[in-house]
Image (tube, grey):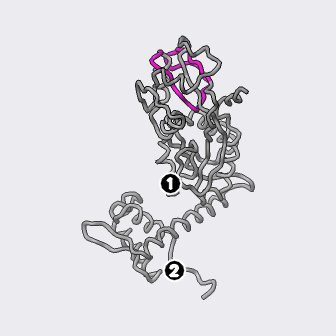
């Protein structure tokens, strides 16, 4: 009847979600610090309340969700999230932001993003708990889509479909040389010139894909001397004069970790800028604290802006 109170509890939903996520009563119990029998009884009570079988028990093989269980798990996660937000709203002052935000960041963007977030944003909103992880772009996209991350800062390249996407900045690729390299004093360089030099490739998606696409778009093939998945290692090798690099992110520090001076030289004809985006789950984008973080991130200096192309 309308207005009737459902004969189920949030605890039952939480135990069932844990079973759905971990695939067994034992694993869910370990996560929740309760006994497996308590989890099994709670799920059975939930099935009775709903009048539907949610999972199939298989001895020594964990549990398998039924079609009804799969739908119920997704709905239960939303209900639990709404309950948490309801609880947070009751312990906050009007207009105060309270609660956790799970933030992901592509590694080369972390030096620009994390200091202002953990300093400026945290001081402005001390009751918002930031949990930050750094990961590759494919992992960040997957975790945002799954709801494990509320938002992530990524380069626009190779971003899979996400519910919410906001452009924060755009940076243009440039060539990086050791200060003693002959091309370091040039006003600009062409990709054709660079094919005569040896490249230190920052070999991490999507950076490597973007760099190589610059050459392939002009029918060129770079001479790759060394590949490294470390941004700073690539800059350090360039600083020793072992090759040049092509990067998008522009650190304010113009020296390598060894202290060797580095010189950024613009590429002409100018290549298309690469966007820095914030990607969000649809659920997270509705939270006031996440919207506030997005607005704050739009004001972050993501790196010295590239000069406009010369006429």
| 40 in the magenta segment | no
In the picture as drawn, the residue positioned furthest to the front comes out as 219
Crowding at label 1, few (<14), some or many (≥20) Cα neighbours within 10 Å?
Answer: some
Q: Nearer the viewer, residue 109 or 288?
A: 109
> According to the image, label 1 marks what residue?
148
Q: Are marks 1 and 2 in contact (CB under 8 Å)?
A: no
Crowding at label 2, few (<14), some or many (≥20) Cα neighbours within 10 Å?
Answer: few
Q: Which mark is residue 138?
A: none
- Residue 142 percent location from the top left of the image: 48, 53
Q: Nearer the viewer, residue 40 or 105?
A: 105
Q: Which mark is residue 7?
A: 2
| Residue depicted at 57% across the width and 36% down the height | 109
In the rendered image, the vertical position of residue 120 relative to residue 193, given as above or below: below
Q: Mark 1 or mark 2, which has the lower sequence index?
A: 2
In the picture as drawn, the residue positioned furthest to the left comes out as 60
- Residue 300 percent location from the top left of the image: 67, 37
- In the image, which residues are magenta? 241-265
- Residue 34 percent location from the top left of the image: 38, 62
| Residue depicted at 49% across the width and 25% down the height | 195
By secondary structure, the bulk of the magenta-drawn segment is best described as loop
Query: Which quadrant, please, contains the N terminus?
Result: bottom right
């Amino acid at each position: 009847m309308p207005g009737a109170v459902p004969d189920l509890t949030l605890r039952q939903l939480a135990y069932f979600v844990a079973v759905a996520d971990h695939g067994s009563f034992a694993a869910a119990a370990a996560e929740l610090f309760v006994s497996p029998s308590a989890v099994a009884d709670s799920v059975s009570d939930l099935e009775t309340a709903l009048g539907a079988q949610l999972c199939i028990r298989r001895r020594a093989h964990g549990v398998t969700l039924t079609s009804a269980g799969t739908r119920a798990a997704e709905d239960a996660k939303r209900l639990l999230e709404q309950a948490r937000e309801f609880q947070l709203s009751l312990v906050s002052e009007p207009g105060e932001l309270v609660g956790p935000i799970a933030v992901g960041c592509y590694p080369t963007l972390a030096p620009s993003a994390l200091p202002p977030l953990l300093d400026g944003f945290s001081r402005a909103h001390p009751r918002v708990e930031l949990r930050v992880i750094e990961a590759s772009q494919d992992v960040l996209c997957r975790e945002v889509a799954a709801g494990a991350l509320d938002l992530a800062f990524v380069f626009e390249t190779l971003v899979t479909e996400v519910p919410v996407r906001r452009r924060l900045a755009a940076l243009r690729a440039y060539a990086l040389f050791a200060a003693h390299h002959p091309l370091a004093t040039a006003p600009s360089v062409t990709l054709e010139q660079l094919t005569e030099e040896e490249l230190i490739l920052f070999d991490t998606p999507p950076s490597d894909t973007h760099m190589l696409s610059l050459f392939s778009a002009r029918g060129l093939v770079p001479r790759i001397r060394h590949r490294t998945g470390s941004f700073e290692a690539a800059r350090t090798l360039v600083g020793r004069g072992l090759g040049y690099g092509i990067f998008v992110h522009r650190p304010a520090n113009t020296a390598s970790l060894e202290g060797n001076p580095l010189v950024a030289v613009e590429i002409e004809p100018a290549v298309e800028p690469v966007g820095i985006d914030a990607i969000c789950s649809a659920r997270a984008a509705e939270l006031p604290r996440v919207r506030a973080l997005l607005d704050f991130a739009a004001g972050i200096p993501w790196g010295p802006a590239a000069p406009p192309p010369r006429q």
